[in-house]
Amino acid sequence: MKKIIVIVGPTAVGKTALSIELAQKFNGEVINADSMQVYRGLDIGTAKVTSEEAQGITHHLLDICELEDAYSVARFQVDARQKIDEITAKGKLPIIVGGTGLYVQSLIYDYQLGKKSSDVQPEVRKKYEAYEQTHGKEALWELLKERDPLAAQAIHLNNVRKVVRALEVFEITGKSILMPEKEPEKLYDDFLIGLSTQRALLYQRINQRVHQMLDQGLEEEAGYLLTKHPDSQGALGIGYQEFKPYFNGEASLESVIETIQLHSRRYAKRQLTWFRNRMQPHWFDLVQKPNEVNTIEFEIKNWLKGAKEE
């Protein structure tokens, strides 16, 4: 199996910086695994790596979509696996970096997305179709987000048919439409790194990052997105959707900042839950223990040599 390094974890724990350092150390190239960073123009709110931060390291799957495009986990599977093949063929090491857990898991494993046609009950489907007619597609998607955040992460609110189908499957089976029918096989020899830090410190860093984004021009970026592409997938992202009441004259900038911070903290908590429950990373805290990067590099060297873990 091809070897890949994977770096996961919540926002604001140093994934980007570590990926650059490891790419320099081990002749690597970075593959983005963040569902919002694929969009051109969404730079500040997604904390997309800058050219200065990249330090000449090649990055893939950034800015590959227009704002009106709908990007999916299935498309990411194809794109990322192709990039892994290309990078490996050059004799370099692919380094996958991102906080979108579904993207990472579906890449590493032979994830067959979807459910059987037997999971169909017309009356259940009609109920959700009626709900959409009465309350609108955004309310329908919010219902999916509440019941099956895994599917909501992958399905755009404009795709009403898929949203209805996901709600239907969840009600009938009690499981996400994206959960595999059988245990998927691993496709790569991966060294999986999980970054985190103490909860209060993480939340403090998230709050600070939101203020930094405002200083960098987040309000203008959000204004363009919500004005020119209000129905885009990106407009649903944290850091953008919270500006809607502000631009409508219904909320202050201070309340928008607080809401972005709150949503970002909640998302970080969900990210950590996902990676701890569904994957088994080597966990490190580079915020409080920056010297642990030496341990990471030592373990990667052994892994690349084929050394078995104790």
Image (cartoon, grey):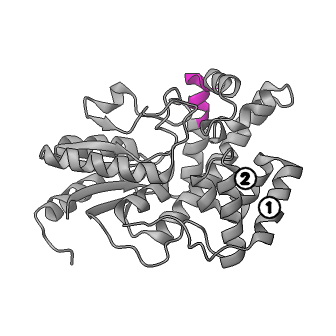
- Residue carrying label 1: 128
Q: In this view, does 90 lie to the left or right of 215?
A: left
Is any part of residue 144 visible from this angle? yes
Q: Kindly state the secondary structure of the residue where label 1 is placed.
A: helix
> Mark 2 packing: few (<14 Cα in 10 Å), some, or many (20+)?
many
Q: In this view, does 69 lie above or below 116?
A: above
Q: Quadrant of the N terminus?
A: bottom left
Q: Which residue is painted at 49% across and 28% down in the image? A: 40
On residue 141, which mark appears?
2
Nearest the eye: 161 or 52: 161
- Which of the 4 image quadrants contains residue 223? top right
Q: Is residue 197 left or right of residue 237?
A: left
Residue 180: give x, y in percent of width and height: 49, 72
Residue 90: give x, y in percent of width and height: 13, 43
Q: Earlier in the sequence, mark 1 or mark 2?
A: 1
Nearest the eye: 290 or 1: 1
Which three-letter amino acid code belongs to the residue tagged 1? Tyr
**Marks 1 and 2, Cα distance to the nearest angstrom?**
11 Å
> Mark 1 packing: few (<14 Cα in 10 Å), some, or many (20+)?
many
Count up the numbered dots: 2
Q: Which residue is painted at 27% across and 62% down in the image? A: 191
Query: Is 284 a magenta residue?
Result: no
Residue 75: give x, y in percent of width and height: 44, 49
Callout in the foreground (1, 2): 1
Q: Is residue 227 above or below residue 196?
A: above
Q: What stretch is highlighted in magenta?
A: 210-218
Is any part of residue 197 visible from this angle? no
Q: In this view, does 96 lie to the left or right of 143?
A: left
Q: Which residue is painted at 51% across and 43% down in the image? A: 71
